[in-house]
Amino acid sequence: MLNRVLLLCLALVWTVSVSVTAQDVAEGGIDTLSLPLPAPAQNVVAANHVYDDGEVIDVNWDKSPDDPENILGYIVYRAETDGAFDSIRTLLPGETFFSDDNVEDEIPYKYQIGVIGENGVSLSGESELAVATWELFNFGMWNTFLWMFVFCGSVIGFIISAKSGRKLYIRKIGGLEALEEAVGRATEMGRPILFIPGILDMDDVQTLAAITILGKVARVVADYDSKIRMPVSRSLVLTAARETIKESYTSAGRPDGYNEDMVQYVTDEQFGYVAAVNGIMVREKPATCLYLGAFFAESLILAETGNSIGAIQIAGTARPGQLPFFVAACDYTLIGEELFAASAYLSEDPKQLGSLKGQDVGKVIAMFGLLVGTAAMTLSVAWQVPATQWILDLMNNLFTTN
Amino acid sequence: MKKQIPILITATVGTVLVLSVFFPPAKMLGEDFSLFFDIIAVFAFFLGGGNLVRVHFIKVYRRKSDWVYSVVTLVGFTMMLASGLFKLGGPPGISGSVTADGSYLNTMFIHIIAPLSSTMYALLAFFVASASYRAFRAKNREATILLIAAFVILLGRTPLGMMATGWVWESLSIFQIPNLAVWVMNVPNLAGQRSILIGVGLGVVAMSLRLILGMDRTYLGGDND
């Protein structure tokens, strides 16, 4: 009886072991153990990243022949001249480039690339030693530097010219001409003026432009003894706007007319801010609404609410995507550059007006470039005129930034 | 002095930030100056929060008109601040995350702030309709062109556009409304946008130059010293 039971147990164990082995073979489990390592990456080259401040080394390599089917990724190893290699980054299959921005300048480093396979990591050969060095000038941006000089030179040239008494013609900007009228209307109606400086912080140039216009508006408001209301969505704008209005009231000889609560912080949250401003509009019904600065999706919500309460509205932004909304819903819109020109325009100071004239030189250059480039490209594509190629190359060199 | 020091700071920081683009050794200094802004902005937040509380508290205290809204503001502000500062409802301790499941701040954000923001954003659909109605009335030549362009774009983005003009021969496929809509967006619209952007770029440079050179002092309240 015992023998029969033992025999049965042996038969069971054999059956199970055979079935497990067959399953392993079918699933490739045993074959996996005998898989070779993936082919290593080739031609690892490390070189200084040009035109930086000595903080980056660029590493390039050729893909492993097993990429992407049989590899899981790459490991970048780094070592100093006689040091051991340390893993510094893991990358996905298909990558052939890595910028190491965690190096000390003037210290030589060498690199090695590991290819991660299911069965282990195969290492490439070591790269040559590379040293991160800094360069004094970024020659990749020589054309930008050149245009900066030309443009700034023309602005300064016109400023000097204006200072010497030369009359400069500046075209009328409707939105800015209407500013005094808008403040006057609010004064007559006994209602406040609402000034919205956009929803970005003081590090945005549009907000800065809005604050410079605020100075002029607040001066007119102080002269007319009207009221200004300014809800803001950034704390720094709150402090800057307060100082600006305060100084405007002081320079108008009415420091007593200034009240800190003219500027009020609401929230940084975009739609929370919109809700609060819309509430102020509906409750207080300002006679004039000024939207000057950086606006996003809230532009139309604000402008349409202002329209619904019958306020005279002047808007200005440099964001092309929001301009159509303002054009549709406001009485006047400062388009792009007009927002930045507003402060100089309103100041009527010849020096500042000269800077506006200097901008025209930039526009002439841009228009000339556009015309020549378009003509050359048309001739090149439509009629394959070979002589146009050097013009296209020249335009590329002059106007393409790296 | 009150104006000269800010002008000096503006000129120095502005010049360094411009130079850091072209001269790599100045890059680090430029990054530091940008960091200073962030630090100042953090401190300024206390001013903003303080102003909010003060303005609304005074409104409630003096029972000014619509003071009830100020109560809602103050209650909301206090609740959010307390639940964030003391990590109410979520994992306790200074290392606990305010966005963890169960945290009151996270719950209020998901169930109150997010839906309210979405509601405000959704209002845009109605405002677009009313603004379009005004803008597209064919009062003059420009408005008529605008109306036709809008009609082409709207129709081109719907199956109706293809259904209506799908029969047009391949050689004249530009006149199929969906293709016409793409052309309007990619050629006249893009050209207009780029011309505005070129103007904006030049305007930014001129304005920056005026600020760096200290010619435009309006942000300091004018030319009075």
Image (cartoon, coloured by chain):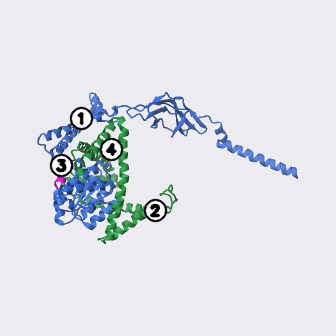
Q: Which chain is green?
A: B
Please indicate whether residue A181 sits to the left or right of residue B194 in the image. Answer: left
Please provide the residue range marked out in magenta. Answer: A172-178
Report which residue position mark 2 lands on. Answer: B83
* Residue at position x 62%, y 34% in the image: A36
Q: Which residue is mark 1?
A: A372
Residue B167 location (% of width, % of height):
33, 49
Question: Could you tell me the amino acid type at mark 3?
Answer: Tyr
Instruction: Report the chain shown in blue.
Output: A
Closer mark to the observer between disc 2 and disc 3 = 2
Tags 3 and 1 in contact by the CB under 8 Å rule? no
Measure the C-alpha gap from mark 4 to mark 2: 64 Å
Badge 1 and badge 2 in a common chain: no
Residue beneath disc 4: B170
> Looking at numbered disc 1 in the image, what kind of residue is underneath it?
Val
| Alpha carbon distance from label 3 to label 1 | 32 Å
**Is residue A18 highlighted in magenta?**
no
Assign a secondary structure to mark 2: helix
Q: Residue at x 58, y 36 (%)?
A: A121
* Earlier-in-chain disc, 4 versus 2: 2
Mark 1 closeness class: few <14, some 14–19, many ≥20 residues within 10 Å: some
A12 lies above or below A138: below
Q: Amino acid at mark 4?
A: Glu
Give the distance between the C-alpha atoms of the residues marked 4 and 1, in whole angstroms: 33 Å
Q: Nearer the viewer, residue A112 or A102?
A: A102
Q: Which residue is mark 3?
A: A345
